[in-house]
Image: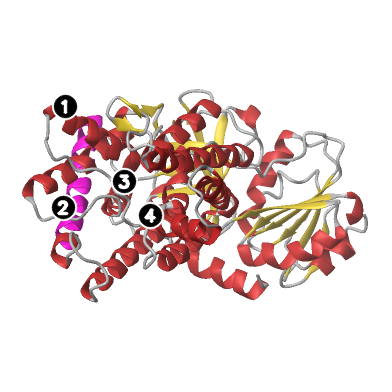
Amino acid sequence: MTERVRDLLDRQLGKVTTYRLVTILLLLLAAVMVGHTVAGAFTDPFTVQAELVSLVVLVVASVVSSRVIGLVWRVRPHTESAVITALLLWFLFWPSTQAADLAWLAATAFLANLSKYVLAWRGRHVLNPAAAGTVLVVVAQDLVGRATPINATWWIASDKLLPFVAIAAVLVLWRTRRIDVGLGFMAVAYGLSVWGLVAGGFDAPFGDAVRTVAYSFPIVFAGAFMVTEPLTLPPRRAQQLTVAGVTGALFAMGPLLALVDEQAPSIGIVSLAQPEVAILLGNLVAFAFARRNGMGLELVGRRQLTPETHELTFRTRRRVRFLPGQYVELTVPHAGTDSRGSRRTFSISSSPGDGTVAVSLRVPEPASSFKRALLGLEPGQSIHGTGVGGDFVLPADPTVPLLLVAGGIGITPFLSQLRHEAHRDAVLVYGASSPDEVPFVQELAGVRVVLVCPGRPDGLPDGWTYVEAPFLSPEIIADAVPDLAERRAYVSGPPAMVNAVRPGLRRLCRSVRKDYFTGY
């Protein structure tokens, strides 16, 4: 992929939060489905009326139940998350206009939202809500003895919808930087499914098996919108890839077992052949593999570093374990939430030994409603952190020479790392947009820093090197740091900057790791 296309994707997708992007894409997929129905591509039970009525019932039930449950638990619910849950469920169940079916669809949405609080661990839900609601409603219908229960059919798996689902999947996985995780799940699930049809006793021709799996198994949809759901994934990339592979194997096993025997294995009345069961089992593997805890964060200090850069320091109610370079996701519910949403991730700028969690943010005008709400906090007020994660950590061997390249607020993970291990052989090359926007000068006074900026700031520490330039480039870095071939490079900042310097550094350094500040 060319740098121009990469920059275009990053720039356009970065204009909205991941939650908003998922909402938009699911709504577009729903519109595509309704359009196909209007054109006659789908028949009973698919009618425009049934599709629209089912969609409205699910969305209303999900949003209302989310708010009611939030009142009971005394938390402010995340409305967009409730909408996404409803949209996911819409693609799993047959549409209907029957009152009884609609009532059970509403119950499914309620159970899905309830699972976020009941089936949770220290503020984080353990199971994918849509998958959990889908299984729980089967159990609930059995308990009341419903003769004709609704069950998930995953009708989103269709030859007519697959191209649109695939495009949406690429956009979601690109925005979340989980292409490898999503593709890992899809490769395992798809490969095992095709192998099962060809060599597992079905003797299906290879071409037929490929088409059958592509059109009849909801692998792409599940991989993009459910398996990579952030609140149920473990924090490190290797762990995420492992969970994706395990879930992919479970995902392939269920449908193949159902094909072998109409009475597929089950736990009680819950069939193991259902895709949602594979997702839930994968969630349990993720939970056992690496528990991710929510946390309460109480603001204890705030300071303005530059005209546009601020640092906020929080005290935690219990010890938070993190590695220098990792991030924390913050939730700040507030009135008048704009398209940027109420959840954002921030690299932690404090050292693990400080006993606090500090984050830094750049607040240009006009600021998002989230940033205004965050800066409006008073000392003593609390917000919620939904977990710590990330793989942008330094080598375990402290003797490895390092090149740290930061653009703008991308300085924050390096600040945590340098505060924690100041003895490292590290050169920090920092690109700033203006002389007024160079934060943490005093904190980095003893570090070897190359500052690249269009103007020279006053009062630079001794030992810093100033390079006058409008932006970072591999050539500038190579001139300033002659021993690049001996160093491992870490690059952090806006996608355009990272994409501009990474290819050159890959040719000049031992290795390169990147950390995007997408849509910051």
Of the image marks 3 and 1, the number of the one nearer the N terminus: 3
Q: Quadrant of the N terminus?
A: bottom right
Q: Is residue 351 left or right of residue 297?
A: right
- Residue receiving disc 3: 78
Rounded to the nearest angstrom, the CA distance separating label 2 from label 4 is 24 Å
For label 3, count other residues whose C-alpha is less than 10 Å away and answer few (under 14), some (14-19) or many (20+).
Answer: some
By secondary structure, the bulk of the magenta-drawn segment is best described as helix
CB contact under 8 Å: marks 3 and 4? no
Nearer the camera: disc 2 or disc 4: 2
Rounded to the nearest angstrom, the CA distance separating label 3 from label 1 is 30 Å
- SS for callout 1: helix
Please identify the residue farthest to the left as the structure is shown. Answer: 99
Q: Is residue 337 left or right of residue 323?
A: left
- Residue receiving disc 4: 341
CB contact under 8 Å: marks 1 and 2? no
In this orientation, does residue 433 appear? no
- Residue receiving disc 2: 57
- Residue receiving disc 1: 143
Of the image marks 2 and 4, the number of the one nearer the N terminus: 2
- The residue that appears at 36% across and 34% down in the rendered structure is 264
Rounded to the nearest angstrom, the CA distance separating label 3 from label 4 is 9 Å
Instruction: Residue 20: give x, y in percent of width and height.
Output: 38, 59
Badge number at residue 296:
none
Q: Is residue 458 left or right of residue 367?
A: right
Of the image marks 4 and 1, the number of the one nearer the N terminus: 1
Q: Is residue 58 magenta-colored? A: yes
- SS for callout 3: loop
Q: Is residue 244 left or right of residue 399?
A: left
Rounded to the nearest angstrom, the CA distance separating label 1 from label 2 is 23 Å
Nearer the camera: disc 1 or disc 2: 1
Nearer the camera: disc 3 or disc 2: 2
Instruction: Residue 85: give x, y in percent of width and height.
Output: 30, 48
